[in-house]
């Protein structure tokens, strides 16, 4: 056995108004081939279209792409109020539940990034919620003689490890591809390669697939390498984690294993056990980001 390609899917682009454009990979259509990734949205946003909302049972991850014009403001009912610049990431491990709100950090500056929902295994569904974050210069970087560049945002690559360590192993690599290289996918892991721009070939177990802008491919790992080749200079993301062999029940902002757990999460939310969070529009901005108040 060796690492093999599962399926290629295009992203579906939607313009939702309120300054929000999203290209979504249909992880539901990929089924277990995408597990533990439940959602991947590649977005551009210039306003604050969403009010504070709850999450439980998974991690809500926002990566601000390095070419973003502006940064991200991320707040939770735990008291977190972060401003993350281009190239940074916020990993919100929702656990048993919290309230969450994110928006561009500055009025008039477009936020360009990806949001990823990473499922948690049953033993981690109800852990205490917490937030991890990383700024651009904290992620280790690898470069090849051919000009390929990899930033280890989460997890490791070529002996370099990110200081952001989630409760369950995961990998998120931001790749600028000029020529090509190989990478391993661990046995029992699924990987998803998503092309932000450019065009590449993905090769594994004698199979190869061509990916253009806003297309994704999934791979099932067996501790053997897959290869990437640039047909045109490209920027892409590699995400991987252990496949979760458990029932998934998803409803609104919660991802659990059973309907009774969903019902219990809604009950915790209604009872105020996930905390409270005043919308950004009604609070004063952090002193280092005075413009946020006007966003």
Image (spheres, helix red, strand yellow):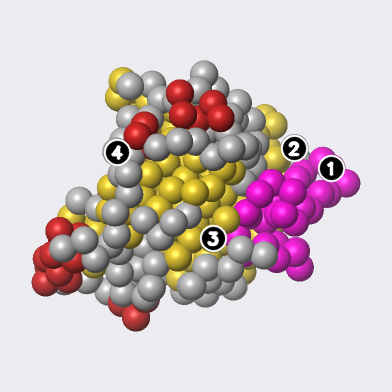
Q: Secondary structure at mark 2?
A: loop
In 3D space, how far apart are the residues under numbered discs 4 and 2 (Cα atoms)?
40 Å
Q: Earlier in the sequence, mark 1 or mark 4?
A: 4
Describe residue 284's horizontal placement relative to residue 94 as left or right.
right
Which mark's residue is nearer the viewer, 1 or 3? Answer: 3
Q: Which residue shows up at 18% across the image and 55% down it?
A: 251
* Label drawn at residue 178: 2
In 3D space, how far apart are the residues under numbered discs 2 and 3 (Cα atoms)?
31 Å
In 3D space, how far apart are the residues under numbered discs 1 and 4 (Cα atoms)?
45 Å
- Image location (x, y in percent) of residue 119: 36, 63
Q: Earlier in the sequence, mark 2 or mark 3?
A: 3
In 3D space, how far apart are the residues under numbered discs 3 and 4 (Cα atoms)?
21 Å
Q: Earlier in the sequence, mark 4 or mark 2?
A: 4
Which mark's residue is nearer the viewer, 4 or 2? Answer: 4
- List the residue tagged with mark 1: 146
- List the residue tagged with mark 4: 51
Q: Which residue shows up at 40% across the image and 53% down it?
A: 76
Q: Earlier in the sequence, mark 1 or mark 3?
A: 3
Magenta-tinted stretch: 134-162
- Residue 103 in view in this figure: yes
* Label drawn at residue 132: 3
Crowding near pointer 1: few (<14 within 10 Å), some, many (20+)? few
- Image location (x, y in percent) of residue 84: 59, 43
* Label drawn at residue 222: none
Q: Is residue 140 above or below residue 267?
A: above
């Amino acid at each position: 056995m060796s690492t093999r390609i599962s399926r290629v899917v295009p992203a579906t682009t939607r313009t939702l108004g309120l300054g929000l454009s999203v290209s979504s990979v249909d992880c539901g259509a990929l089924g277990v081939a995408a597990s533990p990734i439940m959602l991947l949205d590649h977005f551009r946003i210039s306003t604050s279209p969403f009010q504070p909302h709850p999450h439980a049972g998974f991690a809500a991850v926002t990566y601000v792409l390095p070419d973003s014009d502006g940064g991200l403001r991320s707040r939770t009912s735990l008291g977190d109020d972060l401003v993350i610049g281009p190239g940074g990431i916020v990993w919100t491990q929702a656990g048993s539940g919290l309230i969450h709100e994110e928006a561009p950090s500055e009025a008039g500056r477009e936020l360009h990034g990806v949001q990823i929902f990473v499922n948690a295994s049953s033993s981690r569904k109800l852990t205490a919620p917490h937030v991890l974050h990383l700024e651009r210069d904290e992620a280790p970087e690898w470069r090849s003689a051919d000009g390929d560049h990899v930033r280890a945002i989460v997890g490791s690559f070529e002996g370099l490890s990110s200081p952001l360590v989630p409760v369950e192993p995961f990998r998120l690599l931001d790749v600028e591809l000029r020529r090509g290289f190989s990478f391993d996918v661990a046995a029992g892991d699924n990987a998803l390669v998503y092309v932000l721009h450019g065009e590449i070939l993905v090769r594994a177990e004698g199979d190869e697939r061509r990916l253009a802008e806003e297309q994704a491919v999934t791979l099932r790992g067996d501790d053997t390498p897959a290869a990437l080749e640039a047909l045109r200079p490209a920027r892409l993301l590699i995400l991987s984690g252990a496949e979760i062999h458990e029932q998934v029940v998803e409803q609104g902002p919660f991802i659990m294993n059973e309907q009774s757990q969903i019902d219990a999460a809604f009950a915790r939310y209604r009872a105020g056990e996930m905390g409270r969070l005043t919308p950004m529009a009604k609070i004063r901005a952090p002193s280092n980001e005075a413009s946020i108040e006007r966003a």
